[in-house]
Structure formats: C-alpha cells, structure tokens
Amino acid sequence: MRYIKNTLDFMLPKRSIITLGKFDGLHRGHKKLVNRVKELKKPGFETVIFTFDVSPVMRLSDPSFKLILTGEERCHLAKGMDVDWLVECPFVPEIMHMDAKDFVREILVRQMKAAHLVVGPDFHFGHKRGGTTALLKEMGKQYGYQVDVLEKVTDGGAAVSSTRIRREIMEGNLEKANDLLGYPFFVEGEIVHGKHLGHTIGIPTINQRPSVHKLLPPFGVYASITQIDGEPYFGISNIGVKPTVGDSRPGVETYLFDVDKELYGKQAHVRLYEFIRPEYKFPSIAQLQHQIKKDEAACRNYFRDRGKKVFTSV
C-alpha cells in the first residue's frame, strides 16, 4: 500500500475506485465500504481510501476532540486491507473553505482520476458540508464516474458508528467496543523509559506515551495482549497517571507476563480487552505489588475462560 500524507500536491497515476470518509476507527461499517471498493477493482484501476489527517471536528469546533485511531494506527490497519493507496489529505484552510463542486473537480476528478466512488448515506464534504451524495451522483454524469451509496452496518438495531464506539470506549466497555470495531482497541507506539520501578519490585513493565489526541478508556487496569516484533504477549495494562508513584501525563504501562528483556525503542501494539479495576493510589509500594499480582491472576483467568474467542490479531 502506498501512503500519501502532509501534502495537497499529489496525482494518482491511474483511474481509481475510491471510498471517502473520516474513517476514525476503521470499524465494521468502514470495512463494508472498503470491501465494496475491492469488489469493484478491475485491471488498470487502483483502489483508494481517502480521508483527512485530522477529524474536521478538531479544526472546526472542538480542538480537544479525541481520536479512536491516530494517523499511524490507521495506516497500520489500512495496510492489512489490501488496498493500493491511503490518501490522508491535510485538513488545511484551502480544503476547509473549498466549495463542494471544486472539491469534486480538483481533488476527485483531476488529482485522483475518480472512476467509481463508494460512500455512506450521510457523507458530506466541501465548505460547510455543502456537498451531498446527490451532488456526487449529479456531477458523476458530467465527469464520468459512478457512485455507490451503501447503507450503514447495524448492530443491535443501531448503526455501527465512530460516535457509538467512542462512547463505549469512554465508558470502559471494551468488549462491546471491540465487537463494534471488529478488532481489539489498541494503542500503538514506541516503548520509552519510565521510572524503572517495575524492575526493582520484580514486575518489569513497558511504557508508552500516546498522542494527546488519542482517545483512552477510563483510567484503570485492563487485560491486554501486546505485540512486539510480531510476537504476542499476555499482560495487564495500566491506563492513567500511576498515582502511587506520580506521573503528570496519562500513559500506558504494561506488565508482560513471563517476559524480562530489553525492549526500549521498539514499537508495541497494545490491545485492550477487559476492564479489571480502576486506578488507585496505594499507601505503599508493597501494597501496589500485591495488587498487581491479583490483577495478573484476574487477567489470566479472563483469557483462559475465553480461549479462542479472544481476538489475537488485527
């Protein structure tokens, strides 16, 4: 997969079959769009996921808005979807204020050589969301592309949406969020140095510093599986500020069961499965150590009880 980001100056080489959207989460509903794009592929054409580098909400109304997936995490997932291109368009003023018809002419037709578009029923684009699926279809008659508008995927009578998934994550309902996503919610990032307390008490951990724009579940301890260099490791992950030892910025600290080796600088892909307990401030390190062992037992029981039902890959 080829990846275009941080530029408006791009030109695709062949006619393209494109799905467009915010794609925060690349969830089951988004996968329906991507699968349709792949169904439509034919010789001489290329498949494309087109999205923006940030959610328009962050630029237009709420700078504190959190993302289910960072750009790097979204790229990681897209690479496994067997498409030719991921285009991550910068959501800059030039794009924010572009008339919907100009967006079709300049971006979709001229730069991306659109032959077929695949979108959801509520897709809007252009300045003040002035572009609609009806406009896409009307302009397609002039510029020679076709449009598929697919109905939303539903679960339990409600649409599978990024908003719904975000709510489940924020409430700590990881099993439901993972079901709606179609894969385990994860945090991806470099393993960095922490306070090195874990090694001194016989519980070595790895630390990550997620982007400030990354959505995190409620502070607490979660059953997790971490992938490093292609190898999965069972463990428990603490999301929060580690109040017993003190940390000002929220992070992810993971205790990998039965692992004690140098991992600094490597990329870790931490998948969260189940909320175990809230984050506490313990009176002493000894009490913290005792609780971590209890958390480990709870986590091992969780994975043993679920067996093959647990997702182990994205």
Image: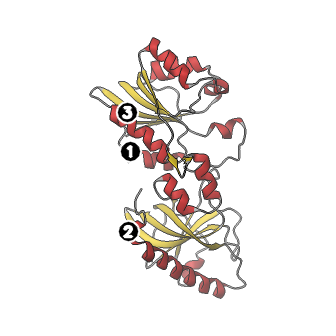
> Going by the image, does 4 lie left or right of 292?
left
- Disc 2 crowd, CA 10 A, few/some/many (<14, 14-19, 20+): few
In the rendered structure, find residue 81 and report the number of the disc placed on it: 1
- Disc 3 crowd, CA 10 A, few/some/many (<14, 14-19, 20+): many
> Going by the image, does 306 lie left or right of 43?
right
Label 3: state its secondary structure: strand
> Going by the image, does 113 lie left or right of 107?
left
Question: How many numbered circles are shown?
Answer: 3
Q: Is residue 247 visible?
A: yes
Q: Is tag 3's residue or tag 1's residue first in the polypeptide sequence?
A: 3
**44 in relation to 105, above or below:** below
In the rendered structure, find residue 17 and report the number of the disc placed on it: none
Residue that appears at 38% across and 62% down: 229
Q: Quadrant of residue 97?
A: top right
* Mark 3, residue position: 47
**269 in relation to 90, above or below:** below
Task: Residue type at mark 2: give it.
Answer: Lys
Q: Is residue 261 visible?
A: no
Q: CA distance from mark 2 to mark 1?
A: 23 Å
In the rendered structure, find residue 308 and report the number of the disc placed on it: 2
